[in-house]
Image (cartoon, rainbow, N blue to C red):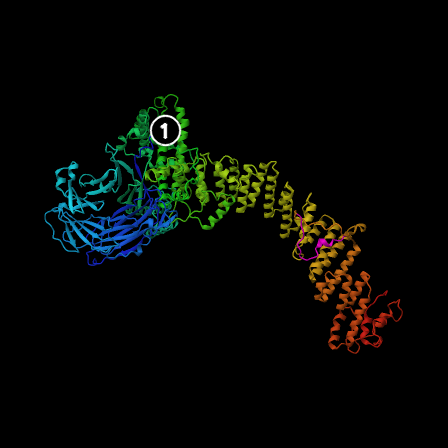
Amino acid sequence: MAAAGAVERSFVEVVGAERERPRHFREFTVCGIGTANAAAGAVKYGESAGGFYYVESGKLFSVTRNRFIHWKTSGDTLELVEESLDINLLNNAVRLKFQNCVLLPGGVHVSETQNHVIILILTSQTVHRLLLPHPSRMYRSELAIESQMQSIFTDIGKVDFRDPCNYQPIPSVPGLSPGSATSAAWLSNDGEALFALPSASGGIFVLKLPPYDIPGVVSVVELKQSSVMQRLLIGWMPTAIRGDQGPSDRPLSLAVHCVEHNAFIFALCQDHKLRMWSYKDQMCLMVADMLEFVPVNKDLRLTAGTGHKLRLAYSPSMGLYLGVYLHAPKRGQETLIDFALTSTDIWALWHDAENQTAVKYINFEHNVAGQWSPVFMQPLPEEEIVIRDDQDPRIFCRGTERNLDLSWMELKKEVTLAVESELQGSVTEYEFSQEEFRSLQQEFWCKFYACCLQYQEALSHPLALHLNPHTSMVCLLKKGYLSFLVPSSLVDHLYLLPDENLLTEDETTISDDVDVARDVMCLIKCLRLIGESVTMDMSVMMEMSCYNLQSPEKAAEQILEDLITIDVDNVMEDICSKLQEIRNPIHAIGLLIREMDYETEVEMEKGFNPAQPLNIRMNLSQLYGSSTSGHIVCRSVCKIASTRFLICRDLLILQQLLMRLGDAVILGAGQLFQAQQDLLHRTAPLLLSYYLIKWGSQCLATDVPVDTLESNLQHLSVLELTDSGALTANKFVSSPQTIVELFFQEVARKHIISHLFSQPKAPLSQTGLNWPEMITAVTNYLLQLLWPSNPGCLFLECLMGNCQYVQLQDYIQLLHPWCQVNVGSCRFMLGRCYLVTGEGQKALECFCQAASEVGKEEFLDRLIRSEDGEIVSTPRLQYYDKVLRLLDVVGLPELVIQLATSAITEAGDDWKSQATLRTCIFKHHLDLGHNSQAYEALTQIPDSSRQLDCLRQLVVVLCERSQLQDLVEFPYVNLHNEVVGIIESRARAVDLMTHNYYELLYAFHIYRHNYRKAGTVMFEYGMRLGREVRTIRGLEKQGNCYLAAINCLRLIRPEYAWIVQPASGAVYDRPGASPKRNHDGECTAAPTNRQIEILELEDLEKECSLARIRLTLAQHDPSAAAVAGSSSAEEMVTLLVQAGLFDTAISLCQTFKLPLTPVFEGLAFKCIKLQFGGEAVQAEAWAWLAANQLSSVITTKESRYRPRLQPALQGVPSTSGPSAPNKWLPECIPLSSDPSLTTLSTLPFPELHL
């Protein structure tokens, strides 16, 4: 269809605010002076509406681009709304309530100046002028680059509605037509506001307000037909009613055209005549009888007109156009609501007796035949809905047509509670059958549905057309919402066109080849006949087959069987006869399929052209960025998908009919096989594609909590996908979105706009926007992005990035059986969904299935692309690495182990990848507490450095978990020395009292019967305890360590019972000092020039005895523990004597063969001090006396000292002669006469060699 895009044949209505919440109108009351006594309600008018477009709304780089105002009047209320297709406007809706006044129909007129937007309002009693800032003066920058901006109505609360300069009551002038339903208003070049009202005498009253910033006088001028003399009324002076015109001269519709300093007022009057007045000259310049241009009978000429309408349009090149509608009440059932005129087109809005709305348009420049083109309107919901037995009436909903006051979930809850409450209130019996209960349910839900129908029908009542000649955009203003008219494609146009229009369709618009065009026309007629014959049940059958992943071909075959069975009107015969008229049905069907297929091999560019200036790119980035535009575009896509689905359905049925006929006369020789194998299998995927797009256009997106979005963003950052344009956090939206709307607003729009304006023939060079062209291009590109068989999967990425996991699962499920494009990407994203829903094993299966497609699909290639661009392994191993990281972040170590195990086979001889994967397996086995499996994985790591790191981690973790038995019992094949080194380094690096690495190492050696090393470890442990832990507890542990070391050596044959004393460098002189390590993390070896000292069992026993004596001293005197820990034997003798532990001191001297001189000197000093001390000193002496194991103690003061020193000293052999003991005592003290020296005699002195 070469000419398919050349001619726009028809338009489709798209509701622009169908699911939008009711606007938050800010309400203001306008109090009028002098209207309090007016008879409120004396005149009642119907609702009216209108719109205003900015002059530069069609310019690409204007701040008012795609921006307009529309309003609705009802009684005393005016609702004003400013809309933008590019940005979401804040505070854009106001409601004005005029006290004691009624707004005139069409009594709102908007104009713009360089600095202001001026709204002129006429009510039944007053006129008003509202001055609002122009958008070009509201923003600092010329370019609107924010996603939200303030409306011109933001500061309307600051307007003084009672300012005399901008408000005046309409004077009670005799001759002013009471109950007039028409008016006009305009601004003069001098800034004056002028209001025109019809007079009862056939003239026109014009009320003038001076410019808002210049003081002046309000004046009224009456334009009279009978005289060219002006009538100027200063103030509110009454004028007598002239009787020279009849009532039939009264204007019914007014329009104004301004030319420089003059204004021409056109009036279409009750006498069917058009009059033109000059305001400057205040005279009637023209009278034209409109009945001369139409064939009418005499009755119409004699009847006063009632519903005539007048419209003006101006073209700088062609001049002024006037459109006149003459209402003939008995001429038809339709009523003209409104019509709009441009320099090329006429648009008309009709409403018939059956409450149906119709819009038609005609291009009077090129349409010679006078054929009006239809607009396919949004139909009202069906009056009856079918609820099958397997459906619950409470959850049944029709599509997505909802008007929400609450959120969707809240609304469902409220409605269900209300209907169920009504049902329960009507039940009088306590018991009834399930069938009766279901019948009651259906009855009450049908009542609710009927109420919804009435509500929607009232809201859909049309009020006016709004046409922007700069952009060719046409809007339909209805009572409850705003709808837009978008062009339909040629295929949709032919399929939806009424029969009377199809008969006169120009075949040259289909194809330049007349025969091909006729074949296509005949084919379309056949499809229309089938579509008209398909019942609701048959239609549901096809949709259910698509939803349930069944074959559409079989469903089409069954529908054909049913059509033949119920064919009572011989429709099948008509179809067969029309098939006979098709010369080449295969070619015609193929042409139709190609026209509907959006498959392309070229992926759309991403991002704007960097060669464009920054301000242009930023400005374009906001084009069609508002929620209103998103809804329009996506509803247009839904309309196209719904229509194309029906066409494909009927085409499948027709092909089944062709196969059933099998007549060579119809198909041509040898074409049956081609039709069956080629066309049929091309049509089915086409139907499924449109079904999928239609489903996505009706599937609502889910509101996602912020914490879920943040968690999802963390997961995506692991995959390094956060820079993708498809993955952005979902912005807050005030109303439900479909997933296609979400995709368009978050991702697709920027891709489409950048693609549009990067084309050689882009409208950027024109800097102008044409709505039909732009909306057609945008919807076509969006369909390409949504088309399942196209490369790239931005749509799926968007759903994944915005946490729409349930919708993504459903989409992939509908896509998987028949679409073989992006299979791996779909499996990966399905795995992400399963991860979120907690189905880990399913997720792992999907990830493994996706691995086979790595390197074949764009998304998977981008997934494995590293940030620095360096390829460190095969693509599939890079993919496994990303998935392993994802599973690790999610916290699924079991799945990490399974996937890493599977990936090892892919690694092959790549030892680096092997090491990475086995390290991963080790880490997660260790985290799970699988110690044996972790050790096994560790032993298989081919990289020695990684293996050593893992071994160190194993030791530390098992120690922290106190799982020391596993740590000791592992065999450590070829790793024994490494383990010992790690434990030793840990033992020497950490606090001795909080970690037990020495004891672990002791157990490690004992388990392997290496007693010498075990003894060495415990001896080093004891040495460090004495040096670093100088407390009673440390001394206790020191003694136990030496005992353990002694036990170890006693288990060895005597000739091998020795150890090497640890060098001082191995235990570090400074407690807590950081050990020096090499690059592997191990402690550096001690200097080799140190002398090696061998310790035998006897040496260890001495050290053990010394440790025990240190503990005895510390227990006797805790303050001595700080110095006793590392003291030598000689130092300990002195400390013991000072503490009075003479027995212990003598024992120590005996063990280490030390002289007893310090002991006796200390003892003698104690005795002397006791002799000369007072009672306090003598009382203190009992403490150290008791510590020396006295055999008996005399407690009486008189007999407490016995002369035992002499026998003791006499029993000590001396080489110095009998007088040697006397050297220890002062000569002034008789040895035998001092009872205090009896303590010496109690000491069991052995034989001493002095």
Can the viewer see residue 352?
no
Q: Position of residue 688 (x, y in %)?
A: 40, 35
Q: Chief secondary structure of the magenta span?
A: loop
Q: In the rendered view of the protein, which quadrant contains the N terminus?
A: top left
Position in image of residue 579 (x %, y %): 32, 26
x and y percentages locating residue 195 in the rendered image: 21, 50
In the shown orientation, is residue 1188 left or right of residue 330?
right
For this orientation, the residue located farthest to the bottom is: 1198
Question: Which residue appears at 46% of the width and 41% of the height?
Answer: 797
Please count the marks in the image: 1
Q: Residue furthest left?
A: 244
In the rendered image, which quarter is residue 669 located in? Answer: top left
Residue 1192 found in image quarter: bottom right
565 lies above or below 637? above
- How dense is the environment of label 1, judged by Cα within 10 Å: few (below 14), some, or many (20 and up)? some
- Residue 330 colored in magenta in the image: no
In the image, residue 895 sits, relative to residue 1141, either above or below, namely: above
Q: Is residue 976 left or right of residue 409?
A: right
Q: Is residue 1062 magenta?
A: yes
Under circle 1, the secondary element is: helix
Magenta stretch in the rendered image? 1060-1078
In this view, the residue in front, 1210 or 1066, is 1066
Q: Which residue lies at the image location 33% right of the left edge and 49% below the top edge?
A: 135
On the image, which quarter does residue 512 sit in? top left
Specify the amino acid type for callout 1: Leu
Direction from residue 11 to residue 742 in the image, left or right: right
Residue extending farthest top:
669
Q: Which quarter of the rendering shows the C terminus? A: bottom right
Image position, residue 572 (x, y; %) = 31, 28
- Residue that badge 1 annotates: 591
Foreground pick, 1106 / 467: 467
